[in-house]
Amino acid sequence: MAKSKTLTFVTELPLIVDSLQEKQLLSRFQAARQLYNACLNSGMARMNLVRNCEAYQLAKQIDRQSKKARLATPSPPQGELIDIPIMTFKLMQQ
């Protein structure tokens, strides 16, 4: 990440919580961390599928000028886009 050009100050204040509140906060942070990692893992898996896709490899080989020329001419739709739920996507990988 690029260094900010404006001055930035961060102040950390300790929370004063009892043991029940601390337990709740820790469990919520843990759940949020697990959800974040699951989403990140899913995104990385999809990225790898795209990178390994033959159509993507062919598209990468096309030089930029011919790509711009092809995009300038309208083409008929190739088919409908479909929404694949994440669970279906996960099952397809297994």
Image: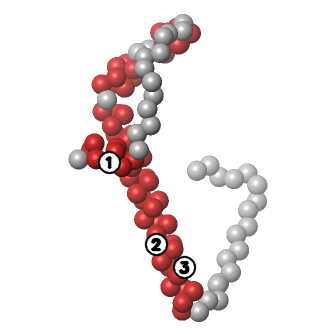
User: Within 10 angstroms of label 2, few (less than 14), some, or many (20 or more) residues?
Assistant: few
Pick whichever, 16 or 66, lies toward us.
16
In terms of depth relative to the viewer, which is nearer, 84 or 46? 84
What residue do we see at 33% from left, 37% from top? 49
Q: Position of residue 72 (x, y in %)?
A: 56, 9
Question: Which label sits in the foreground, 1 or 2?
Answer: 1
Q: Quadrant of residue 48?
A: top left
Asked which secondary structure carries label 1, the reply is helix
**Residue at which label 2 appears:** 30
Q: Position of residue 67 (x, y in %)?
A: 48, 13
Residue of label 1: 90
Q: Judging from the image, what secondary structure is the residue with disc 3 in?
A: helix
Please determine whether, in this image, residue 11 is positioned above or below residue 39: below
Frontmost residue, 46 versus 82: 82
The secondary element bearing badge 2 is classed as helix
Instruction: Give above or below for 54 relative to 20.
Output: above
Q: At x 45% / y 24%, what residue is drawn?
A: 80
Q: Mark 3 or mark 2, which has the lower sequence index?
A: 3
Location of residue 79 by image quarter: top left
**Residue flagged by tag 3: what amino acid is it?**
Leu
Q: Is residue 92 visible?
A: yes
Q: Earlier in the sequence, mark 1 or mark 2?
A: 2
Residue 36: % across, % down:
47, 59
